[in-house]
Image (cartoon, helix red, strand yellow):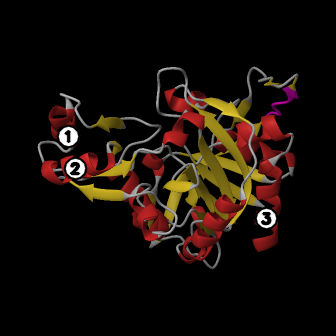
Amino acid sequence: MKLAFIIDPIAKLDPAHDTSVALMEAACRKGYEVFITNMSTLSVKDGKAWAFLQSTKIKPVPLVDGKWQVPNPWYEVEEGEFQPLENMQFVWMRPDPPVTTEYLYATYILDYIDTSKTKVLNSPQGIRAANEKMYALKFTKAIPKTIVTADKSTIREFVSAEGKAVMKPLGGKGGEGILFLEVGDRNINSMIEISTNIGTMPVMVQEYLPDAQKGDKRIILLDGEPIGAVNRVPQSGEFRGNMAAGGSAVQVDITDREREICNQLALALKRDGLMFVGIDVIGGYLTEVNVTSPTGIREIDRLDGVCLGDRVMDWLAAVK
């Protein structure tokens, strides 16, 4: 089986953390052929999607005494060639967000893959339709009180009603740009103006969930089914649990309420071709649906003593 991974430059990836590396390592371990490329090489030629693909080997990254032991070097990349992506059985679209114009154009090129020959994970149409903040609004029984607006007075009214709130840019990642709003904060007008670009850019505003201090849980879903979770606990003095914002990864179980949320999402995710997804849950409420390059596998594997990459590869073999 041949798998192509569209990723950020491989030398910049962290093999002890990056889920793309974990997936590629699992594929190599299974004896599958792994190829890498980046968005800038994607092209359409003769009505087909092409890319410059480099055969890649990922060396095993063993877990020793609770720490990933990264070999040096940890990957080998061959020269590569320009070829149709339909030569692959699967193409993984996994550059990190934000979803820029370049990213959107890449998804348009991926539309020219013959899906009867090659499956794209996640679906380019699904990625375009699923803004990682807005997509959660489809599931009204799962989310906290939420508004999306660029209007300052509407945001102030919401904060006044709730007492505390969290404001998020719709295109943010890793907790970047998320602000805590509270009644009486003298900076609230300025924060709203900066975030909304003086009332021209809509933002998401959600009620503040006190359980955020206990952690922001990342749950990995494969074909709509939860396969693992990790809790991301904020560091002292911080309200964001994202690992990119300094949150600590802590072992955690998936609750009945969280399984119920996953069930609410499953049909829509499958319909939209969003097969490998990471959802964020705080205090029993869905806050985000991550579809671009959801991460967390390395942390779950380390804490739970599992290998989710192998499970994903076995699923690919079954659906091939």
Circle 2 is placed at which residue position?
A: 155
Q: Is residue 8 visible?
A: no
**Badge 3 element:** helix
Q: Residue at x 76, y 52 (%)?
A: 33
Q: Position of residue 252 (x, y in %)?
A: 74, 42
Residue sitting nearer the eye, 123 or 149: 149
Q: CA distance from mark 1 to mark 3?
A: 44 Å
Instruction: Report the span colored magenta.
Output: 59-63
Residue sitting nearer the eye, 146 or 275: 146
Looking at the rendering, which quadrant does residue 318 occupy? bottom right
**Badge 2 element:** helix
Marks 1,2: beta carbons within 8 A = yes
In terms of sequence position, does the residue under pointer 3 or pointer 2 come before the other? 2
Q: Residues within 10 Å of mark 3 (few under 14, many from 20)?
A: few
Q: Residues within 10 Å of mark 1 (few under 14, many from 20)?
A: many
Circle 3 is placed at which residue position?
A: 315
Q: Residues within 10 Å of mark 2 (few under 14, many from 20)?
A: many
Residue sitting nearer the eye, 207 or 97: 207
Q: Nearer the viewer, mark 1 or mark 2?
A: 2
Q: Is residue 60 magenta?
A: yes
Q: Position of residue 268 (x, y in %)?
A: 54, 74
Q: Nearer the viewer, mark 3 or mark 2?
A: 2
Which amino acid, by three-letter code, is at mark 3?
Answer: Trp
**Which corner quadrant holds the C terminus?**
bottom right
Q: CA distance from mark 1 to mark 2?
A: 8 Å
Which amino acid, by three-letter code, is at mark 2?
Answer: Ile
Q: Is residue 26 above or below residue 129?
A: above
In terms of sequence position, does the residue under pointer 1 or pointer 2 come before the other? 2
The answer to whether 309 appears left or right of 263 in the picture is right
Circle 1 is placed at which residue position?
A: 192
